Image (cartoon, rainbow, N blue to C red):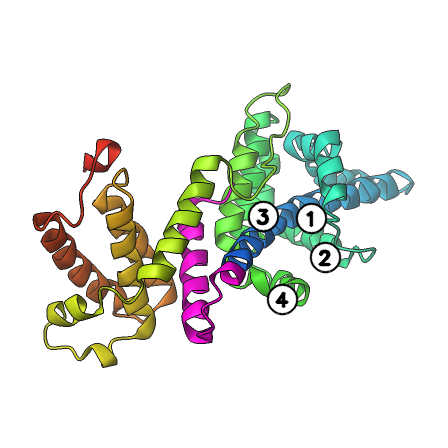
């Protein structure tokens, strides 16, 4: 479920923590790494549960409107009923396998329905929803609106961040990645009879498990092995003055390039560049790009980086 960029970020964070701790306890660090990945998956489930809670709240609202014998109720009913009938929301709320999975993982926002009610109001009052109810009534429109809600509205409220901070320290600054996974699940609902397909574990297959373990273990073992060489490559820079996180990003990228012959160097370079843009200083990506480009070329010439199979692709 979790993509490799988030895996790389988690490894970067845990290698940094391991290096700072200085206790040499690699076993503990690896356990903490996989716990952190599991917590990311838990956040994905919490977002799904929030969608279920919103569906429950809109059902209640429609029932309340039906029981009001006034003319204005008809207009209000029409406003809410399109969301109530959203096919993807219905698929999510009626999926028994999903319900069992959420229950087994103890996923609940608690008895307080305030968050779901708040999001229901945000949805109904949003210009995106106004456009949605004017479009044709189809599973495609339903899917596109719900995906747009997750991408454009869900993380646009301070309330959600307050809730997440209270629930887990592991969810800091990774909401965008998890929402992208939720959107992928939503976009798989392409027909009326197709069920909502959800991810059931943090890491999707054994290949990603092995990738995670190997990169992390190699990073712990070799994180300082390239220090002297990097000093010689950082022109006009005192390595002690280079931002610590920039240097760690460079080292981790080098280790991946060396240890994974099937991953193209261009993929490694682009992934760690994106990480540097998100997590390091303003000028970091330019610096990281320059150093990695130079060092990758040097290591390829010296046969330290050797690519095979898919790794040969540009």
Is disc 3 surrounded by few (<14), some (14 to 19) or many (20+) residues within 10 Å?
Answer: many
| Mark 4 or mark 3, whichever is nearer to me | 3
Between marks 1 and 2, how big is the CA–CA gap? 8 Å
Give the mark nearer the N terminus: 4 vs 3.
3
- Which one is in front, 294 or 61? 294
In this picture, residue 164 sits left or right of residue 280: right
The image quadrant of residue 140 is top right
- Which one is in front, 133 or 261? 261
| Mark 2 or mark 3, whichever is nearer to me | 3
Between marks 4 and 3, how big is the CA–CA gap? 16 Å
- Identified at 46% across, 57% down, the residue is 10
Is disc 4 surrounded by few (<14), some (14 to 19) or many (20+) residues within 10 Å?
Answer: few
Which residues are drawn in magenta? 1-29
Give the mark nearer the N terminus: 2 vs 3.
3
Can residue 8 be found in the magenta stretch? yes
| Mark 3 or mark 1, whichever is nearer to me | 3
Between marks 3 and 1, how big is the CA–CA gap? 15 Å
Q: Magenta stretch: dominant SS? A: helix
The residue under label 3 is 41
Give the mark nearer the N terminus: 1 vs 2.
1
The reply to whether callout 2 and callout 3 are in contact (CB within 8 Å) is: no
């Amino acid at each position: 479920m979790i993509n490799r960029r988030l895996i790389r970020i988690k490894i970067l964070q845990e290698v940094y923590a391991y290096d700072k701790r200085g206790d040499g306890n690699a076993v503990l660090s690896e356990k903490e790494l996989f716990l952190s990945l599991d917590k990311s998956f838990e956040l994905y489930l919490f977002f799904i549960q929030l969608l279920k809670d919103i569906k429950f709240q809109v059902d209640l609202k429609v029932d309340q409107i039906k029981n009001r014998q006034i003319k204005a109720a008809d207009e209000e009913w029409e406003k809410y009923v399109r969301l109530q009938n959203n096919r993807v929301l219905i698929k999510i709320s009626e999926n028994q396998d999903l319900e069992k999975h959420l229950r087994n993982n103890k996923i609940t926002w608690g008895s307080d329905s305030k968050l779901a009610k708040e999001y229901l109001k945000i949805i109904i009052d949003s210009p995106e929803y106004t456009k949605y109810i004017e479009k044709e009534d189809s599973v495609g429109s339903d899917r596109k609106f719900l995906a747009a809600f997750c991408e454009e509205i869900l993380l646009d409220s301070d309330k959600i961040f307050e809730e997440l901070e209270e629930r887990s320290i592991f969810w800091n600054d990774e909401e965008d990645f998890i929402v992208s996974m939720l959107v992928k699940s939503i976009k798989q609902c392409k027909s009326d009879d197709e069920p909502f397909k959800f991810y059931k574990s943090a890491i999707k297959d054994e290949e990603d498990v092995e990738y995670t373990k190997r990169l992390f273990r190699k990073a712990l073992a070799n994180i300082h092995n390239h220090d002297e060489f990097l000093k010689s490559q950082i022109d006009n820079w005192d390595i002690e003055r280079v931002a610590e996180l920039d240097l760690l990003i460079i080292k981790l990228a080098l280790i991946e390039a060396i240890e994974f012959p099937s991953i193209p160097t261009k993929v490694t370079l682009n992934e760690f560049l994106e990480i540097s843009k998100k997590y390091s200083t303003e000028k970091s990506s330019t610096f990281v790009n320059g150093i990695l480009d130079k060092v990758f070329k040097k290591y390829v010439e010296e046969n330290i980086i050797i690519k095979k199979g898919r790794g040969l692709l540009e």
